[in-house]
Image (cartoon, rainbow, N blue to C red):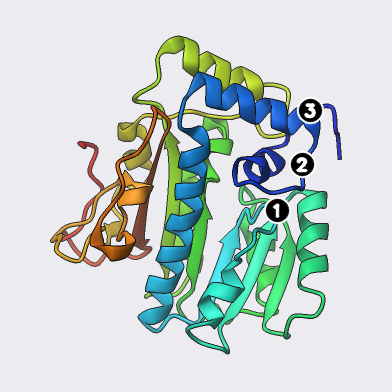
Amino acid sequence: MDPTRPNSARVYDCLLGGKDHFVVDAEAAAVMEKAAPGTRAAAIANRQFLLRALTWAAERGHTQFLELGTGIPAQTNVHQVVQAVHSGARVVYVDHDDVVVAHARALLARVQANVGVVQGDVRDLQPVLADAAQWLDFRRPVVVSLVGILHWVADEDDPASIIAGLQRHLAPGSMLITSHACSDALNAAAAEALTATFANSRTPLVLRSREQIAALLSGLALHPHHARAEVGELVEVSAWRPLLDRAPKPEGIASILGAVADLHPAGPRHVAKASP
């Protein structure tokens, strides 16, 4: 733990209104909001997207969930959401950060045996999946959450290979819930301010365009983001199956795009779109 450098999990906690962060993290969150107005609102919308997508997946019969890059535990967590639908649902939380893992284990110390915590890095999937197998049966479908994580994975670490690895190792019927910060509305000064904030952190921020994010999902079968939609596409996270069938207009220029996809393509009906 280094209280002198911002940490992505702690900054996210700050943006969500949590209390598990340091002054340096609050300062980083303030810089982000100034450079890209709407950052706090986007972070909250991102978390709400995850909870809606989890509920949607659980209501369709999924009972196994793997959260990669869990971050500081929030007020409502994955196991609480899915077990409200299926009391016996199994959940594994994964993070590489020592403090995050300690928080998660403390939170789950009195939780039933079908919820686990694994310390590992999404860039090295095999040991993560091996440890998660204590709780999950990988012969059956698993819903994987990779929400707000890939923009912390550098190009040289090949974020697309993480998704490809999930495709190789998970059973047919498995799904991916994912989101990524989008740079399309940012000018050069804003983008530079955001990336500079995390330049010296353990996980530097990587901003990508809609086209680049769509490329990471190339070939996946995306589920429609709306009950009346016929094809799936990347959308602002607030627009993915919003409550009351209505998405609030995003505020500011900060943008996070999200999608829910089948990890094993079902055909040409759903494709990742680069266009708005």
> Is residue 153 at least partly visible in the picture?
no
Do callouts 2 and 1 mark residues in contact (Cβ within 8 Å)?
A: yes
* Amino acid marked by disc 2: His
Labels 2 and 1: the sequence-earlier one = 2
* Amino acid marked by disc 1: Ile
Q: Secondary structure at mark 2?
A: loop
Q: Secondary structure at mark 1?
A: loop
The part of the image, by quadrant, that contains residue 266 is bottom left
Labels 3 and 1: the sequence-earlier one = 3
- Residue carrying label 2: 21
Q: Which mark is residue 72?
A: 1
- Determine the CA span between mark 2 and mark 1: 9 Å
Left of 180 or right of it: where is 25?
A: right
Q: Position of residue 270 (x, y in %)?
A: 20, 58
- Residue carrying label 3: 5
Left of 175 or right of it: where is 224?
A: left
- Determine the CA span between mark 3 and mark 2: 11 Å
Q: Residues within 10 Å of mark 1 (few under 14, many from 20)?
A: many
Task: Give the foreground label among 3 and 2.
Answer: 2
Labels 3 and 2: the sequence-earlier one = 3
90 to 247, vertically: above or below: below
